[in-house]
Image (cartoon, helix red, strand yellow):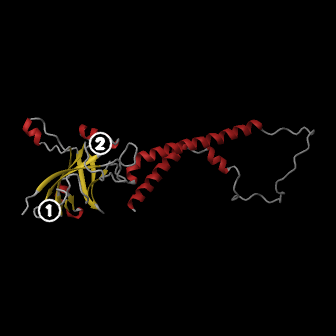
Amino acid sequence: MPNPITRSLQLAAVRKDADALTAVEAGSGRRVYTFRASDGDFDRYSDRLNVKGWRIDGYNANGVVLFNHDDGAQAALTGAEPPLPIGKGRVYVENDALMIDVEFDDEDDFARKVERKVAKGILNAVSVRYLMLPGQYRANDRGGFDCDAQELLEVSIVTIPGNARALRAKSLDGEGEDLVERIAKRVVELLEERESKENDKADASDEQGEKPNTGDEPAAPNESKPDTGEPPSADAPKADDEDDKAKGLDAAQAAKVFVEAFKGYIRGSDKK
């Protein structure tokens, strides 16, 4: 029976479409980064892992995320201070891939540095360390192994990727805060431009005013509807209502309302 084999498989990841920020879980404010950690195609070890064969319960019970697979073994030999995990992860199988949601420790200085580099797209890779289970793998014609079942041991943020197929998952949440803020900023600009135009129009109208009739000029024909003698209805719309609303528009408040509505839209879309 073949012995178990432990591998550290480095997989590439690319940032989500957000310019500089991360995914934010709906309503919690937690920054969660989603990576594709593995797929069923050949990796750069020439191994091929069955996506449905991942054993992940053990990892999810203690989902530590390390940096460059540094679990402290080297520090124990040198007497240096052992590194601590930089965050926690939750893995799951989705369609044809092993996915991981990573949340960094925001109370750890080094973890915050790593997170910033991930958010900026400077660090773009995760790596999984796994154990090929006895009797569940066989040699393939590429010099690697085809594995039907493997246990996930650890996940790291790494500096050097090994598989260009492992991409950061695209999600509306990934665009969340940054996208909403950029849109809101543009909305404020448009609303302020509109308000400015309405005010300019009103000022020009006030300056022009009505010229007094000296008797030298014929009176302008009355093109309004004839007076029927009935008082105007209280429900009748006033022509100036729209202008008054526009003039009294609070651009900042409107933008705030828009931000909340748009966030709700994003969260609703992600749940579909």
Whether residue 124 sits left or right of residue 145 in the image: it is right
Q: Earlier in the sequence, mark 2 or mark 1?
A: 2
Whether residue 52 sits left or right of residue 78 in the image: it is right
> Nearer the viewer's eye, disc 2 or disc 1?
1
Pointer 1: residues within 10 angstroms few (<14), some, or many (20+)? many
Circle 1 residue: 137
User: Residue at coordinates 85% horizontally, 38% vertically from top-left?
Assistant: 212
Q: How many marks?
A: 2
Whether residue 156 sits left or right of residue 32 in the image: it is left
User: Where residue 38 sits in the image (x, y, percent)?
Assistant: 25, 56
- Amino acid beneath label 2: Leu
> Which of the numbered marks, if any, corresponds to residue 123?
2
- Looking at the image, the residue that sits furthest to the right is 216
- Amino acid beneath label 1: Tyr
Pointer 2: residues within 10 angstroms few (<14), some, or many (20+)? many
Element at label 2: loop
| Corner quadrant of residue 267 | bottom left
User: Where residue 87 sits in the image (x, y, percent)?
Assistant: 23, 46
